[in-house]
Image (cartoon, helix red, strand yellow):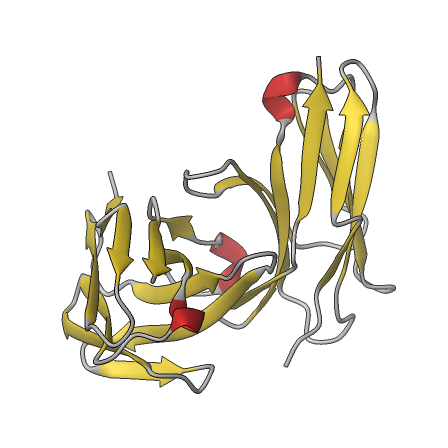
Amino acid sequence: ILNVEQSPQSLHVQEGDSTNFTCSFPSSNFYALHWYRWETAKSPEALFVMTLNGDEKKKGRISATLNTKEGYSYLYIKGSQPEDSATYLCAFGAGNMLTFGGGTRLMVKP
Amino acid sequence: SQTIHQWPATLVQPVGSPLSLECTVEGTSNPNLYWYRQAAGRGLQLLFYSVGIGQISSEVPQNLSASRPQDRQFILSSKKLLLSDSGFYLCAWSVGLSNYGYTFGSGTRLTVV
């Protein structure tokens, strides 16, 4: 059983704050690391897929970094907005399977 | 383009009743198909996956079963639901290696009462 951990479990921030959270995963047999954004009662939406050590991806105010040697990825949100409120999932890919972390639930207060 | 349909969106079932959740994919052939569940306060747990018609792998022992009667159809079933089966169920598909990620259905909220 692969261990994919996310921290913190939940996070409350004020509108305009920048924030980041962590995903840790096994450093062996690495294929890919995925980030998803999941709003309540909707499908998880793919944000990033990263495959190379040192990868950095950016989409608007959201960015992510990857360190496969030490087994962690960071997701950053700059200038949080209320519409950023969601659960952010990371998933470790090995072969044709994804193993998901428990998610970080972000709540942005106006 | 590829789409994934999952139904029903919500379901309230009594303990001991049967269950059938259906997922269909359009616009692709021979997809890998997955059933995940999120129980209250927990992350996504893989229940079943299938790489082809009639091929089902179970990740967690439980009173649920899955079937793939057609290439793009994946069904999650139970003969008798337990209270612990309550949760949010997601179907997903992928083209193959995990580099490509998954595309998820809209989910089913199951409450067993």
Along the horizontal axis of the image, is B81 left or right of A44? Answer: left
Location of residue B69 by image quarter: bottom left
- Residue B77: x and y in percent read 23, 73
- Tell me: B82 left or right of B72: right
Residue B34: image x %, image y %? 37, 66
Q: Residue at x 26, y 82 (%)?
A: B55
Residue sitting at the far right: A70
> With respect to residue A107, does A68 lie above or below?
below
Quarter of the picture holding the C terminus of chain A: top right
Residue at coordinates 71% horizontally, 72% vertically from top-left? A3
Q: Residue at point 39% right, 49% down? A: B103
Q: In the depicted view, which residue is nearer to us: A56 or A19?
A: A19
Q: Is residue A40 above or below residue B57?
A: above
Furthest residue to the left?
B70
| Residue B94 seen anywhere in this rendered image of the structure | no
Farthest-out residue, bottom: B61
Where does the N terminus of chain A fall, quadrant-wise? bottom right
How far across and how far down the image is residue B83, in percent?
40, 70
Q: What is the quadrant of residue A43 in the picture? A: top left
Residue in the foreground of this view, choosing between A42 and B39: B39
Give whichever of B31, B62 is nearer the camera: B62
Q: Total number of numbered labels?
A: 0
Using the rendered image of the protein, determine whether residue B33 is visible from the camera's viewpoint. yes
Residue sitting at x 38%, y 75%: B48
Percent position of residue B11, x then y:
26, 53
